[in-house]
Amino acid sequence: MTDPHEVHATDIDLSAYHDAELPAPSRLRIAAHIAACPLCAKRLADFAVLSADVALLPKESLGFDLASVIAGQLPAPARSSRRTPGPGWLGLLPAGIGATVSIALGIAMGGVLFGGGAALPRETAAMSVFDSIPPGGLCLGLDSCYAEYSNKTGVVK
């Protein structure tokens, strides 16, 4: 297993192995790999040193419960000003109005866009600004509109 091309254990696997969080088959596989791979054994030893160093850090505590202090300063929850819908079909009335308006608008816009609508003119003059030929022009581009004259002969090229 000391082949340089073999796949080494990941840091996640080594950390889980150190914390005894791996299932038995994975734990056995990692243990066998660590026994044959000095690189992964060194990384596992680094995890052990890091874990021991973290355990040596002092435990910080405030000495009192901060949650009760914060909870005492929070404002009371606001009461909702929404009315509860009435019983039966009256509760569905606002949703029914919204659905009716959206369907009516959809039908009206569809009628305008797909023919029969008087709102759109037949000739859309506003779209002519996107044409490759300017309005009233006969040329495809600026270069083709102007003839090139030879200064010496006066002949149009």
Image (cartoon, rainbow, N blue to C red):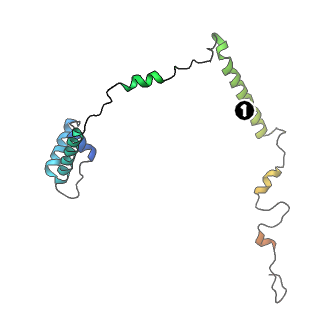
Residue 50 % position (x, y): 23, 45
Residue 27 % position (x, y): 19, 40
Residue 25 horizontal side relative to residue 145, left or right: left
Q: Quadrant of the C terminus?
A: bottom right
Residue 81 % position (x, y): 62, 18
Q: State whether residue 80 is above or below residue 109.
A: above
Q: Residue furthest left?
A: 35
Residue marked by disc 1: 106
Q: Amino acid at mark 1?
A: Gly
Residue 22 % position (x, y): 23, 37
Q: Secondary structure at mark 1?
A: helix
Number of marks in the image? 1
Q: State whether residue 69 is above or below residue 148.
A: above
Q: Residue at x 40, y 22 (%)?
A: 68
Q: Residue at x 66, y 13 (%)?
A: 89
Q: Residue furthest top?
A: 87
Q: Residue at x 77, y 58 (%)?
A: 131
Nearer to us in this view, 84 or 88: 84
Q: State whether residue 89 is above or below residue 100.
A: above
Q: State whether residue 47 is above or below residue 141.
A: above
Residue 116 horizontal side relative to residue 2, left or right: right
